[in-house]
Image (spheres, rainbow, N blue to C red):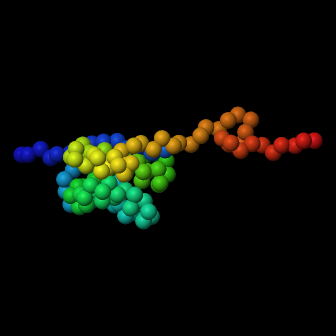
Amino acid sequence: MEKMVEYVTVGRRKESVARVRLRPGTGKLKLNKRDFEDYFPRETHRIMVLSPFNISGTIGKFDVVATLSGGGSTGQAGALKHGITRALVEADESFKMALKKAGFLTRDPRAKERKKYGQKRARKQFQFSKR
């Protein structure tokens, strides 16, 4: 029996982590044991997640099984995009230049700023009273 080829990577964005398994297939995406359209009802998130396939020209050639955790829906979509991009580069090194040029291989370093003591939030301060 022939062993199935599978590429396992991790993508991150904000507080979200996506563990991605990419294997040759028909283009099905299964996220946390749910359907892709069910997991990401927003069209913008779906476009974001599928963009690495569009740039590499591999729409419908790979199946994705991913486990997403932490953060919100936008962070999870970004983490999944990052994970899929890494897996595609692992699958075929020739995709690297196009995906890097599009900025998909770079992990987005922006994260929530920590709250400071003596303030309401990271930057917002309590109301100042002169008298």
Q: Is residue 7 left or right of residue 126?
A: left
Q: Position of residue 10 (x, y in %)?
A: 34, 42
Residue 25 shows in the view: yes
Please name the residue shown 42% across and 51% down the image.
78
Q: Position of residue 76 (x, y in %)?
A: 43, 50
Residue lying at the far top of the rendered structure: 117
Please name the residue shown 81% across and 45% down the image.
127
Q: Position of residue 12 (x, y in %)?
A: 41, 43
Q: Quadrant of the C terminus?
A: top right
Residue 83 shows in the view: no
Q: Is residue 113 left or right of residue 120?
A: left
**Front-most of 55 and 131?**
55
Is 40 drawn above or below residue 81 in the view shown? below
Q: For the image shown, how many numbered marks are present on the structure?
A: 0
Residue lying at the far right of the rendered structure: 131
Q: Is residue 86 left or right of residue 128?
A: left
Q: Is residue 28 left or right of residue 43?
A: left
**Front-most of 35 and 99?**
99
**Front-most of 128 and 72?**
128
Please name the residue shown 27% across and 55% down the image.
56
Is 98 drawn above or below residue 116 in the view shown? below
**Quadrant in the rendering for residue 44:** bottom left
Please name the residue shown 48% across and 41% down the image.
109
Q: Position of residue 88 (x, y in %)?
A: 26, 48
